Image (tube, rainbow, N blue to C red):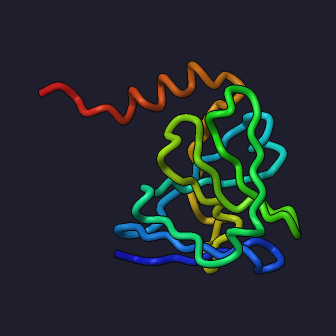
């Protein structure tokens, strides 16, 4: 198991997450908020994610269905991580906030957040176990 750390721009909010082998790609969503943030997401299970410092510096933004929880630093405004609408009990970390990750070499998987319902259906269908 590997551990990676990240932070907001001013360093008040710090976090870490664990993953099995390597970060092999990033999810790039084109919904109205992710597009404006320029976020590149990596999903982790709730047990694999920890806020190390600055929980009191986090602000929350929600819109639409108010299912997703978008966290950002109230001091510098950096969007560090979220609980996504597609899996609200998981975390997605913004790889642009993670130390030592070369985002230029990571393959990017597009998620068509502008057409969220259809994209979510296809995304979940692609990850469903195939019938035996």
Residue closest to the far right: 76
Q: Position of residue 71 (x, y in %)?
A: 71, 55
Give above or below for 115 relative to 88. Answer: above
> In this orientation, which residue lies closer to the viewer: 40 or 89?
89
**Residue found farthest to the top:** 118
Position of 68 with respect to 10 (left or right) is left
In the displayed structure image, the side of residue 97 where residue 130 appears, left or right? left
The number of discs equals 0
> In the image, what residue occupies the spot 53% across and 53% down?
91
Question: What residue is drawn where x is 66% and y is 76%?
Answer: 14
Residue 132 lies, with reference to residue 93, above or below; the image says: above
Quarter the C terminus occupies? top left
Horizontal side of 87 relative to 58 (left or right) equals: left
Residue at the image position 73 percent from the left and 69 percent from the top? 56
- Compared across the picture, whether 72 is left or right of 55 comes to right
Q: Nearer the viewer, residue 115 or 106?
A: 115
Q: Quadrant of the N terminus?
A: bottom left
């Amino acid at each position: 198991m590997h551990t990676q750390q990240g932070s907001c721009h001013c360093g008040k909010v710090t976090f870490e997450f664990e993953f099995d082998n390597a970060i092999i790609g990033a999810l790039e969503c084109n919904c109205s908020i992710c597009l404006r943030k320029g976020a590149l997401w990596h999903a982790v299970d709730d047990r694999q994610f920890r806020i190390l410092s600055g929980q009191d510096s986090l602000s929350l933004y929600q819109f639409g269905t108010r299912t997703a929880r978008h966290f950002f630093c109230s001091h510098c405004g950096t969007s560090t991580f979220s609980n996504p609408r597609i899996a609200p009990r998981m975390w997605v970390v913004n790889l642009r906030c993670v130390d030592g990750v070369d985002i230029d070499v990571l393959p990017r998987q597009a998620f068509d957040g502008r057409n969220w319902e259809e994209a979510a259906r296809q995304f979940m269908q692609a990850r469903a176990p195939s019938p035996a």
